[in-house]
Amino acid sequence: MRKKIYIAAYHQSKFGKLMGMMVPEILKNAVTETCGVVKADPAVVDVAAVGATCNISLNEQGLLGGLVAMVPGLAAKPIESVENACASGGQAIISVIHKLLVGDGEVGLALGCEKMRDAEGKMDGKLIGKVLGFFSHPDDRPGKVYIFPHLFAEVMDVYMKQWGVSERDLAHISYLEYANAKYNPYAQMQKVQITLDEATAIGERNRYVVEGLPMKTYDCSQITDGYAGLLLATEEGLARLGVARRDCVEIAGYAQATDPLLKAGRDVLHPAGANRAMSRAYEMAGLKPADVNVAEVHDCFTVMGAIGTEVIGKAVPGKGAAYWVEGKAAPGGECGINTSGGLIAKGHPIGATGVAMVGWCAWQLLGKAPAELQVKNAKAAATFNIGGPICASVCTVLKRA
């Protein structure tokens, strides 16, 4: 029988701009601040994994595990960095869980970070578009300047035509997520509010991203700096930390699956790997989609907010956008989805995203979300973190311990 794995602590930076804070300091802060939530010395950590994506291409820094090992008490311990595109944070969580299950330790640290802006908070859009494009198949790149917006604009076009969904239907997702971000003190777009008409109509701030395709600016996630950390533990680990099980959340189900990288030839409206991973996570947890009333899904673009709603089992294929239009995804709805603001309004520091999804759901289940966003009687949660053109998928199911 598998050991149970618990979330003993979660911490994240405010998402947006870390200004002059560079990767070594980011990782040091991620370790010490996450451990500090439960007043634990970092030396109590047995194993760790760091999820990051652009650390080499944008920051000229590799071997992040070595930077983590610089924190006093962590030297000579099993620490690795993992990369699975935008699912790197989720992959770090899976990695730590596996290390704990095979007996490498009882306390683990799953970290995620990304530094995408310079010391003045500015970004180089063309460079970022280029380096993110490295995580696509070479045959998917020709003719695309900003590869992933273009690829997902194609997905959005197919989704709308296949299911009879309008641009305004999908705009409900960004509109509602900006409304949620207003109350999340960690959200990048906390101080920006948009109306549904603004999210739908073409204007100075909302333009079509790719000529001839329906995706607009407000359909897109943010370019973000940020870090996040989860302190994971077995029951023995909780005892070492001095953390009561009643104050924790159990990662009751978890799974990862990967589809071929080339988008062509795959049914992206019914992503096989994502559905397989989500089904396995539910099965492991002994829960069904109907049991979940909190979720965070990977809305790198609004169409993925809709597809993600379908993957977690809250809507049948083609009805994910309608779930949002009908108000079911609101904090007071049937299942509060992306109450954090999602990638679109909370922000998308790529390596930290999967960690932040799980961490926010843990806060919801513990009743620690801001009052305006807190889901009443939060009982179980699901997360869906993807990498690439719906290629890598990491899914979890959480419940109160």
Image: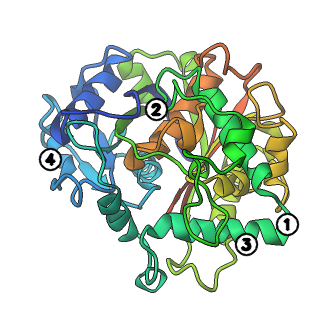
Q: Secondary structure at mark 4?
A: helix
Task: Depth check: give the residue in front, 364 or 218.
Answer: 218
Quadrant in which residue 20 is drawn? top left
Mark 2 is on which residue type? Gln
Left or right of 354 in this view: 332 = right
Q: Nearer the viewer, mark 4 or mark 1?
A: 1
Quadrant in which residue 275 is drawn? bottom right
Look at mark 2 in the image and give the residue it sits on.
188
Q: Is residue 33 visible?
A: yes
Callout 1 touching callout 2 (CB < 8 Å):
no
Please give the name of the residue rendered at 79% of the width and 24% of the height, measured from the top-left corner.
332
Please give the name of the residue rendered at 77% of the width and 37% of the height, measured from the top-left corner.
329
**Could you classify mark 1 by the number of other residues whose Cα lies within 10 Å: few (under 14), some (14-19), or many (20 or more)?**
few
In primary-sequence order, the first of circles 4 and 3 is 4
Callout 4 touching callout 3 (CB < 8 Å):
no
Q: Is residue 313 visible?
A: no
* Mark 3 and mark 2: Cα distance apart in space: 30 Å
Q: Which mark is residue 158?
A: 3
Look at mark 1 in the image and give the residue it sits on.
163
Look at mark 4 in the image and give the residue it sits on.
66
As drawn, 106 above or below 185: below
Left or right of 215 in this view: 100 = left
Mark 4 is on which residue type? Gly
**Could you classify mark 4 by the number of other residues whose Cα lies within 10 Å: few (under 14), some (14-19), or many (20 or more)?**
some
Q: Secondary structure at mark 3?
A: helix
Q: Can you give x and y, in whole percent of width and height, for residue 345 in the image? A: 55, 37
Q: Nearer the viewer, mark 2 or mark 4?
A: 2
In primary-sequence order, the first of circles 2 and 4 is 4
